[in-house]
Image: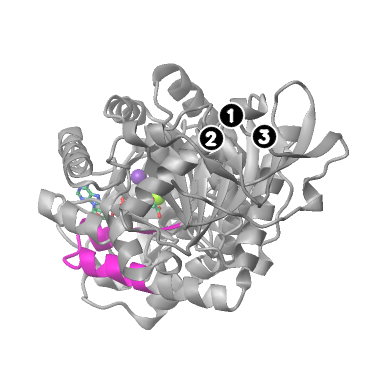
Amino acid sequence: MAVVTGNPIISPSLLTNRVTQFGLRSEVSGAKVVPGRAIGSGGKGKGKVRVVVKAAVQIGGLEQLKKAKEGLGFDTVSEGELREKGFLGMRKTKLVCTIGPACCSLEDLEKLALGGMNVARLNMCHNTRDWHLDVIKKIKKLNEEKGFCVSIMIDTEGSQIQLLDHGAPSSVKVEKLEGYPPFTVQASYDGFSEGIEVGEVLVIDGGMASFEVIEKAGNDLCCRCTDSSLFLPRAKFSFWRDGKLVARNSELPTLSKKDWADIEFGVSEGVDFIALSFVNDADSVRQLKNYLYMRSSRSTRVLAKIESLESLQKLEEIIEACDGIMVARGDLGVEIPYEQIPTVQEEITRVCRELNKPVIVASQLLESMVEYPTPTRAEVADVSEAVRQYADALMLSGESAIGPYGQKALSVLQMASSRMELWSREENRQSILHQRPLGESLPDRIAEQICNCAVEMANNLGVDAIFVYTKHGQMATLLSRNRPYPPIFAFTSDKGTRMALNLQWGVIPVLVDLRDDEMEANITMTMELIKRKGMLKPGDVVMVVSDLASTHINYSAFQSIQVKTVV
Ligand SMILES: Nc1ncnc2c1ncn2[C@@H]1O[C@H](COP(=O)(O)OP(=O)(O)O)[C@@H](O)[C@H]1O
Ligand SMILES: C=C(OP(=O)(O)O)C(=O)O
Ligand SMILES: [K+]
Ligand SMILES: [Mg+2]
């Protein structure tokens, strides 16, 4: 029986002007009160809001422990990391790997999972659906049979993709030479030159090579190379006039017919995330979310990829409409001058944190490792900068998909993230995290305040871990938003919530049978289970935050903070 004690903590910010009563409650049925306190607040209950200071309790509920499946849904990688590095040594930044020919075997996928891959990305621009299905099945097999917790993301091709294919198997050198026979390349759709005039500039892959349009015949353009360099297979391109980007063909829908077919495929295979390419406004995000809501029982999360000028102009509305953001620096660097990427990335990351949405920094993080076994210093600095900005996740593209050093690249992300996270903690950079109030309803504002206060308490008290008990993950994201020093163990009985929290900074999602009306018993049961696994030891201090209902306090929902010392 875990006898727990707590410390008296009252946070005035919890006292809202609608508090009708304030009192010390000691009776929690089925439990004996021991000195100690917790902060709680009434939820939606009887229309009243009460801030209740409730003593931490010696809790019954052990019968639930016997019933609880011994297999607490702790993934093997997090468990190993905790045993090896301790609570504070656990990595916070999540890692996404694009799966391609170089890593699609079962053993390669297992190595990436062991190396810390949290999310596997399937880019529907490439390969066949059968190929992607095979990868999905392998990842599910690894999760089920080996205890991993790798979420699956499909990334749509998008209808505005502008690809030039010269047909050669690898990159082609282009020169500013006169008098050579023209060299023809195919564009990925007929209307690629709509609105383009002679004299405009065609830029390949954000500046890899540039051409001047010297003649237009129907849809075809004849261009002269003005800046020689490399022309990659399936290169992306953009047009510029007087130094300004010529807007893309916005008549095309964000979601093409192929995209809808890929989405249908993803939903039927139960993927956890759908990353929407070339989002230009919130409408396409809402359209997809509505479709998913009607179509799928599981809550597949929609990520919006910021990779066009229009999306930057509508950034906040897009962030508010989606479940997360990917800073897709590859195409973004084609759409805006690439020297603007660092500040744009920082701003997107900042707004995402403020609006409590996870953000992935993607593309070219370790591009040289597509060919070389070690990164450049500049690339390590780029990774560290994204971590310093408190991005939730980092993503490998060609580095894992086609490069021979995918596992090495993943370990570089892992090491650079852990180092920068430690530095940020030592520099107390957490203090820079300005929190714009988000919640509108009182219960939401209480949940937000509780999480803000809980993180401040956790950091000030130096607790070892934060345990949060959550149904849909909201409290876990609100805690993560504050970027706490200790890890956040998010206990949930909802599989979709668990897989979605894999993208949330500092959150270790744990699947466990929770009972809606037995908050205290849930706490006992999980702490006992983790203690039995040897991952909690006497003297460890755990902060417990919950938004589960509790009938003891005859509220439909009870949000509380408790600080418990394991004995
Ligand atoms: N599923 C796949 N099958 C084959 N090749 C892939 C796959 N995913 C990615 N690749 C390769 O890896 C490269 C980098 O991946 P990514 O950045 O996701 O694609 P893109 O280049 O279209 O932006 C792609 O250009 C492609 O050559
Ligand atoms: C991640 C990106 O999208 P994709 O790889 O699908 O082009 C990007 O453009 O950076
Ligand atoms: K894509
Ligand atoms: Mg892109």
Instruction: Find out whether the residues at labels 1 and 2 contact each other: C-beta distance under 8 Å.
Output: yes
Q: Is residue 326 above or below residue 333?
A: above
Tell me residue 269's x, y (percent): 26, 29
* Residue picked out by circle 3: 27
Q: Is mark 1 within 8 Å of ligand 2?
A: no
Mark in the foreground, 3 or 2: 3
Q: Is residue 236 covered in magenta?
A: no
Tell me residue 310's x, y (percent): 58, 45
Mark number displayed over residue 549: 1
Residue 338 placement, left or right of 430: left
Q: Is mark 2 within 8 Å of ligand 2?
A: no
Mark 3 and mark 2 lie on one chain; the one further toward the N terminus is 3
Q: Is residue 292 visible?
A: yes
Type of residue at label 2?
Answer: Met
Q: CA distance from mark 1 to mark 3?
A: 17 Å
Q: Is residue 321 above or below residue 428?
A: above
Mark number displayed over residue 519: 2
- In magenta, the rendered stretch is 393-415
Q: Is residue 412 covered in magenta?
A: yes
Mark number displayed over residue 214: none
Type of residue at label 3?
Answer: Glu
Q: Is mark 3 within 8 Å of ligand 2?
A: no
Identify the element where label 2 is drawn.
Answer: helix
Mark 1 and mark 3 lie on one chain; the one further toward the N terminus is 3
Which sits in the foreground, 355 or 76?
76
Identify the element where label 1 is drawn.
Answer: loop
**Which residue sits furthest top?**
294
